[in-house]
Amino acid sequence: MKDKSLGRGLSSLIPQHQQKDEPSDASKDQGGQTSEQPASSGQEGVGEFQYVEVTTIEPNPYQPRKTFDESALADLASSIAEKGVLQPLVLHKNTDGTGFVLIAGERRWRAAKQAGLYHVPALIQEALADADQARLALIENLQREDLDPIERARGVADLQERFQFTQQQIAEHLHLSRSRVANTLRLLSLPSSAQTALAEGKITEGHAKIIAGLPDVEAQERLLHIILKQTLNVRDTESLVKTAPESYQRPVNERVKHIAGELSERLESKVEVRARKDRYVVTLNMSSEEDLQALAERLNS
């Protein structure tokens, strides 16, 4: 049976918590500031609210984000130093029970450490098995809006590989269409230069989709170079590929050319075959509606 909590995200974790007492002044003096008391989330779920020492928290191994903007992190640390952590982290206990692993809130945790906090507010989740904790952690991170497209694609691939999820299951958990999941995974087929350009915002997912449809790395790299040099938008890029298809298609081998010639003779019409990345496109050229009707009659006879 599908675990519905995974589709609900953090709402399945954050409770109408019963807050434990804020750490005493003595505990604050052991290593820095603590956080202000956060507001209740107002959401129901399973978990326990408490203040946790920042040094007992481990980063989430399923975090799709591999890099953090140091400038933005410094700004957040400055805000936390002034106001505290206003939204609790979500944690679960590690396997030996000596510390905690992040499910959500890694930026707040990193910034809190930079700000010199000793304790941070957290919701401790213990009800799920390890595999479900991992799935939930990854799903929650993928639902974030500030992941770049490549981070998101790697996270989706991780979800698929670690837990043998189908694209349809991933789509249901992330509230996306299956085609969107497929297109997201397709980004990982791009050459590294295109992945970097996409992650850095130099091209869009629309550009990336066009590049990914080209037959080989050489053609993909060539188109990427033109997009960046001429600052083409997606529509211009589509037009370029359509008006100069010979520059972005796979060469047709002699055997395919021979087959195209035989088809032309049998159908009494010019047949063109173009090789795309993963398929052949066959085009019949007809000079009139009558020729098209005659071809249909020959095919039906």
Image (tube, grey):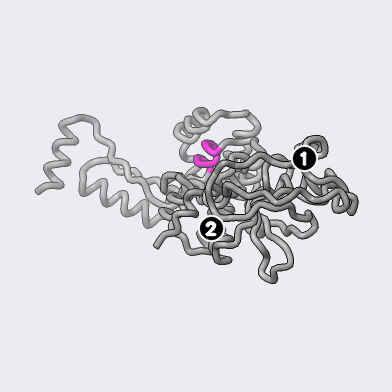
Which residue is painted at 66% across and 63% down in the image?
Answer: 93
- Residue that sits furthest to the left in the current view: 301
Residue 130's place in the image compared with 248, above or below, is below
Task: Please give the count of numbered marks on the rendered protein.
Answer: 2
Say whether residue 209 is magenta. Answer: yes
Q: Which span of residues is magenta-colored?
A: 205-211
Which numbered disc, 2 or 1, marks the residue that appears first in the sequence? 1
Q: Are marks 2 and 1 in contact (CB under 8 Å)?
A: no
| Residue 197 visible in the shown view | no
Q: Secondary structure at mark 2?
A: helix
Instruction: Read off the residue under disc 1.
Output: 84
Numbered mark located on residue 159 in the image: 2
Q: Is residue 273 left or right of residue 69?
A: left
Residue 300: image location, x then y, percent: 12, 47
What amino acid type should be assigned to the residue bearing mark 1?
Gly
Please name whichever residue, 213 or 58, is drawn nearer the observer in this view of the structure: 58
Residue 139: percent from left, percent from top? 55, 52
- What residue do we see at 71% from left, 45% from top? 107
Tell me the crowding category of disc 2: few under 14, some 14 to 19, or many 20 or more residues within 10 angstroms, Cα based: many
> Quick one: 274 or 217, which is closer to the camera?
217
Residue 249 seen in render: yes
Q: In front: mark 2 or mark 1?
A: 1
Residue at screen point 50% across, 40% down:
210
- 111 lies left or right of 87: right
Kindly identify the residue that appears in the image at 75 percent across and 55 percent down: 52
Q: Majority secondary structure of the magenta segment?
A: helix
Q: Amino acid at mark 2?
A: Leu
Q: Quadrant of residue 137?
A: bottom right
Q: Position of residue 62 (x, y in %)?
A: 62, 57
- Quadrant containing the N terminus is bottom left
Q: Residue furthest bottom?
A: 96
